[in-house]
Image (cartoon, helix red, strand yellow):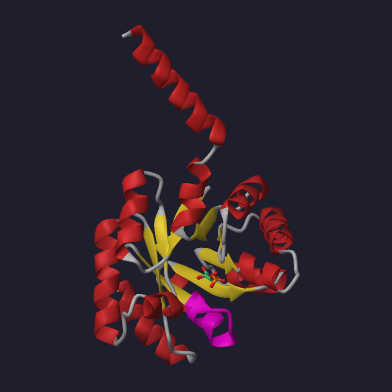
Amino acid sequence: MKFFIDTANLEEIAEAQALGVLDGVTTNPSLMAKEGITGADNILNHYKKICDIVEGDVSAEVIATDFEGMVKQGEELAALNPQIVVKLPMIADGVKACKYFSDKGIKTNVTLVFSVGQALLAAKAGATYVSPFLGRLDDISTDGLHLISEIRQVYDNYGFETQILSASVRHTMHVINCAKIGSDVMTGPLSSITGLLKHPLTDSGLAKFLEDYKKGN
Ligand code: G3P
């Protein structure tokens, strides 16, 4: 399973990249605003900085909600760097724009997906990635992981190549369960990746090894 980090924070992206396990980055307008990145030029420039840090795919979201606007913004984003994946909302014009970009060989990520039907539409439009929002479903007492498993089944039934990018991942158990279900990618905060390192038996075991080494030397 690929690990993407879901942030626009350059320090966190660099930390995950330095760990050697990072496959890409996802962002959205809220994450950009959280870092204080506003204005079209600053946002485009920030995407360039992200691409300089990581080697993999970087999802950059359009703001337009009409087909022409999405195409214009998506082409501008895709021209920044070959790593850019044009992120499009799951609305009718987003599906049309997804088909437009996939026909042109430009990578796409269809976002704000909350149902199997929406994921099926994204795959039929040739999306590179589909982003079901796991945590936001859990937030409303609906089983987000169940949606991921249903999308997995449907995609496998028909051999769709669209990669399931489990998004709105909040913690390590989401990561582990996504891997068990067969999600192609997960995107979450840095803590959902570094949290996987932690086990008290690792810490106590290492402390004992070092203590015993000191006794013998
Ligand atoms: O990848 C989607 C993500 O940014 C949404 O996460 O935690 O705001 O639901 P969250």
- Judge by depth and name the residue closer to the eye, 92 or 103: 92
Q: Number of numbered discs present?
A: 0
- Give residue 159's position: percent from left, percent from top: 64, 54
Q: Residue at x 66, y 58 (%)?
A: 155
- As for residue 12 lying within the magenta part, the answer is no
In the figure, is residue 84 to the left or right of 192? left
Q: Residue at x 56, y 52 (%)?
A: 184
Q: Residue furthest front?
A: 215
In the figure, is residue 178 to the left or right of 206? right
Q: Residue at x 71, y 59 (%)?
A: 154
- Give residue 114's position: percent from left, percent from top: 66, 73
- As for residue 92 lying within the magenta part, the answer is yes
Quadrant of the rendered image containing residue 57: bottom left
Quadrant of the rendered image containing residue 217: top left
Main secondary structure along the magenta-highlighted residues: helix
In the figure, is residue 125 to the left or right of 40? right
Quadrant of the rendered image containing residue 47: bottom left
- Judge by depth and name the residue closer to the eye, 94 or 115: 115
Seen in the picture, residue 178 relative to 136 is either above or below; the reply is: above
Residue bounds of the magenta highlight = 88-98
Seen in the picture, residue 63 relative to 101 is either above or below; the reply is: below
- Give residue 147's position: percent from left, percent from top: 71, 63
- Judge by depth and name the residue closer to the eye, 71 or 105: 71
Q: Residue furthest top?
A: 216
- Give residue 163's position: percent from left, percent from top: 55, 58
